Image (spheres, grey):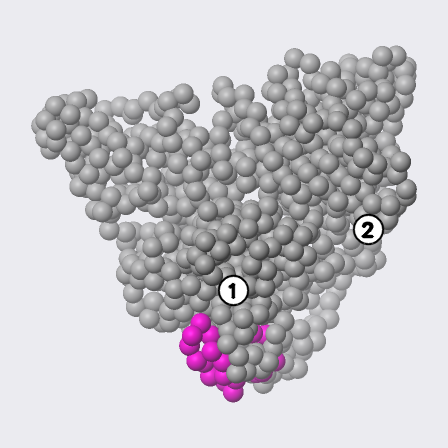
Amino acid sequence: MVAFTINGQHQELDIEPETPLLWVIRDELGLTGTKFGCGIAQCGACTVHVDGQAVRSCSLQVGDADGKTITTIEGLSPDGTHPVQQAWLAEDVPQCGYCQSGQIMAAVAFLNEHPDPSDADINDELTNICRCGTYARIRAAIHRAAAIAKDAGGTP
Amino acid sequence: MTTMDASKAGAMSRRQFLVVSLSAAGGLAIGLSLPDLAEAEPILPEPWSEATGDEINAWILIEPDDTVVIRVAQSEMGEGVFTALPMIVAEELACDWEKVRPEYASANRNLRENNVYGRMLTGGSSAVRRSREFLQQAGASARERLIHAAAERWGVPADACTAKDSVVTHAESGRSLRYGELAADAAKVKLASEPAIKTADQYTLIGQPKARLDTPPKLNGTAQFGIDTRLPDMLYAAVVTCPVFGGSLKSYDAKAIEGRRGVKSVVPIPGGVAVVADRFWRAKEAVAALPVTWDEGPAASTDSAQFAEAYRTALNGPAAIARKQGDVMKALADGKRVEALYEVPHLAHAPMEPLNCTAHVQPDRVDVWIGTQYPEAALDLAAKAAGVAPEKVELHNCFLGGGFGRRAVNDELTQAVLVSKAVGKPVKLVWTREEDMRHDRYRPQAAIRFEAALGPDGTPKGLRVRTAVGSIERSLGWGSADKGVEPSAVEGLANQPYEMGAIEVDCVLKNTHVPVMFWRSVGSSQNAFAMEGFVDELAYAAGQDPYQFRRKLLAGKDDFLRVLDTIAEKSDWGKPMPAGKGRGIAIHESFGTIVGEVVEVAVSPKGEVRVERVVAAVDCGHVVNPRTVEMQIESGVVYGLSAALFGEITIDKGAVVQGNFDDYQVVRLADMPWIETHLALSGGSKWGGIGEPGTPPIAPAVCNAIFAATGKRIRRLPIKDFDLSGERS
C-alpha cells in the first residue's frame, strides 16, 4: 500500500511501489491534466508539486511519494485564478496546450523560490519543452505573474 | 474535478455532463463540448444529435440561452482554428462573440451528408483560406433566416429588421427578439436566395485581436486530448514494432509475461505486437519484457552515411524537369561561376503528445477517440481495420497535442482498432516517446545542388538547381510520384521568386526504407534553407549587401519588397555589429504567404551559437486574428530553429538512433531569442496560410547570420554538427 495526499484528498492505493507517480495520477486517479511527454524527465509535461517542490512525476516512483503531499494542475486553485493561471490567460500562452499544465506547475514552484525573477533566472531554471514554441509568452507570463502576486501582497 | 468516475459519467447525458463540467470549472471555463465528450464517454447512437438547441444549418446551432455553437471542421493543434474559424462565421452571423462556443464537426455526418463540412483535413496551412467563403456564407445565411423568423412573427418586412449582437430589432416599432428566441423558427425558414457575403472592407470582427477560445481549459487541466480519453471497462495497450522499417514480427514468447499483474493479452499488430493490460504502465513494462524476434529484412544493414552518399550520387543521374526558362547551360558557360551543395537530414515531428488512440469496436459500430489532422481518412482507416463500412464509425476528434503533419496519417489508429477488436473491449493504445520517435514518418533527407553564373556587375545570368529527395507521395502510396516530380520536393525551388536569367530546376525522387511525410512546411523548410543560403552566397560573390542584392533581384515584386524592406528597417539592417555577432536575412513564400526574417546571432570563441533576435514580417494578404498570426510566426520560428540548431534523425543498422528528447534536442527557454512580428499585408484578393510559413526562413537566416559573424558557410544541417570555434575580429 502507498498513501499520500493529493489535491487535499487522502489516497491509499494497492499499487506496485515502482510505478511512476505520473501513471498513478493519470490512470489510477483519473487526473489527466498531468501529461505524459517523454518518460525520462526531459520535457516536464508531467510536472507536479510534491511537498511544494516541482517534480517530474514520470521519474518519481510512487513508493517514494508515500506520506507526501502532492498538488496537480487540477488542485492548483479552486477556480483557475492562481496568479500564474491569470498571467497565462492574459498573455495568451497556450497553443496546442499539451505541455502547459507542466509549464504552469514548474512556473509556480519557480516563482515561490524567485518572487522577482530575471530572464536569466528563468532561462537557467525552467527547462520544460514546448514544441509549439510558446517560450516568449511563457517568459512574459512569469514576469506578469510575479507582478500580480506582488500587487496582491503575497508570493505566487 | 476531472476525476469524475467514468462509470457515472456513462450514465449521464452529454448535456448533463457539460453542465457539470462547466460549473466545476468555475467562471474561467468555456465549455468545449467535444473534448468534454472524450472524457464523458457517452457512447450514444448519435453522439452529435443530442444538443438541445436549434440547428440553423450544419455549422450553427443556437441554444435558448443565446449560446451559439459553431462547428469547426479543422483540427485544433495549436494553430488557433477553434477561434479563427468561428470568428469568420460570427462576422456574418452578427452574434454576440462572448456567447460563441466552438465544437468539432462530425466526420461521420460529413460522410453521411455528402461532405457538408467540406474537406476534413488540416494541413498545408489551408484552414482559413480554403473555408473562409463558405463559412461566411453559412453565417450570413443563418443571420438572414433569423431576421426572417422575427419579421414573420411581427408581420413586418424582413428588410425593415436588423441583426446585431444576437438580437433582431425592428427599429420602427422598437421591438426586438433574441437569437435564442428565434432559433427554432429560423431553422424552418427557407430563403429565396442566399445573401451576399461581406467583402474585406466591411469586416468588423475579422481582423480584431481576439483571445483564443480554447485557452481556459488549457490552463486548468480540463482540455481533453486524445490521450485523456477514459471509458468504462477500458484496457490499455503498449506496442513494440520492428526497429527496422519494413521488417516484421517473427516470433514472441507470451509465456514470459504470463502472470504479470494486470496483463490481459498479447495481440500481434502489423510489424509488431501489442500487450494489453489494465493499466498503461503495466502494459508498457510487460511489452518491454516480452521476448520478441524480428525479421528485419534487407534494410538492416543501412545507415545515414550511405543514404547521404546515395543522395549526392543521385544528383548525377537522370532527373525530371520542374521548371525550365531559357538556355541555362549557355548562361552558365559565361561569367563568374558559383556552385554549392546543400544537405538536410531526416527529421522527426516529435509533438508533445505521443501518438495514441482509444478504440471501442462493437459488432455494429466502432468508436474512435483520437487527435487527428485528417478525420475523413481516419474514418476510413478505422473502418478498414475493423472490417465495417465507414458509416459505422464514429470518430471523436480531440485536441491535438501538436500535429506538425504527423497526425495526418494515423498509424496508431489502425493499431488501436485491431487491438480493441481482438480483445472485445475499449482499448487506449499509447506510444512511448521512443516508439513515437523511432516510428515517425520523417521529413525527407535531401541533397540540393546549385550552379549559377554572375555577370560582370554581379547580376545572375543563370541558375541551375537539382534536388535529390525522398518522395512523400511514393512513401504514402499515393502513386503520382511516377511523374518524377512532386510539389513538396521542389516547393521553394521551382517557384523561387528572384530574377535569375535562365533557370532550370529538376528533381530526383529517391526513397529508402525510411518512411517520409509532410512536416511543418516540409519541402519549403528544406529548400528555403538551401535556396536562401545560396542566394546569400551569390550576394557575397557579387560583392553586394545580401539585403540590397535580394532587393534588386525582386524588382517589381511589391509584396516581396514590402516584407523585405520591413524586416530590414525594423532590424536596423546595416548597423555595425561587434565582433562575433552577425545579422542574416532570408525571405520565402510558402502556402500563399511571404515571410521574411532577419536574425542576429552571437558565436562564442568556443563555437557556441546563440540566436539573440528574430525580426519577422509577414504578408498573408488578410488577417483573421492578429494574435494568432503573431503566435504562429513565433511558433514556426521556434519549430524551424530546433531543426536548424539540433534536428537530426540518423539511421544505424536500418533503425532510428534517436529515441527521446535527450538525444533529439529541441529549443528550450534558454535558447529562445527575442522575436518580433510585423504585418506587411498586401490585402486584395490574397489570403495566405499562417501555420507553416514562419518556419522556412529561419534556418537560412540563422546560417547567413553565422556566416556574417564567422565567415563560415553552413551548407548542411544541423548547425550543432559544425565546429564554429575561433577568435573573431
Residue A19 on the magenta span = yes
Q: Is residue B294 above or below residue B182?
A: below
Real-space CA distance between mark 2 and mark 1, rounded to the nearest whole angstrom:
37 Å
- Amino acid type, label 1: Thr
Question: Element type at marker 2?
Answer: helix
Question: Element type at marker 1?
Answer: loop
Q: Who is closer to the viewer here, A127 or B11? A: A127
Q: Who is closer to the viewer here, B561 or A8? A: A8
Image quarter hosting the N terminus of chain B: bottom left
User: Toward which corner of the image does residue B597 lie, by quadrant?
Assistant: top right
Residue beneath disc 2: B304
Which residue is depicted at the point 84% across and 24% down?
A: B540
How many residues crowd mark 2 within 10 Å: few (<14), some (14–19), many (20+)? some
Q: Return the chain for callout 1.
A: A
Which residue is depicted at the point 57% across and 55% down?
A: A116
Q: Residue furthest front?
A: A153
Residue B486 on the magenta span = no
- Amino acid type, label 2: Ser
Q: Is residue A59 above or below residue B455?
A: below
Q: Nearer the viewer, mark 2 or mark 1?
A: 1
Please tell me how many numbered marks the rendered image carries.
Answer: 2
Horizontal and vertical percent position of residue B207: 44, 30
User: Toward which corner of the image does residue B354 lie, by quadrant?
Assistant: bottom right
User: Toward which corner of the image does residue B46 lie, by quadrant?
Assistant: bottom left
Horizontal and vertical percent position of residue B362: 41, 65
Which residue is depicted at the point 31% across and 40% down?
A: B60
Image marks 2 and 1: residues in contact by CB distance under 8 Å? no
> Can residue B370 be seen here?
no
Tell me where the magenta segment starts and ends, as one range.
Answer: A1-21
Which residue is depicted at the point 73% across and 67% down?
A: B294
Residue beneath disc 1: A34
Q: Who is closer to the viewer here, A36 or B72? A: A36
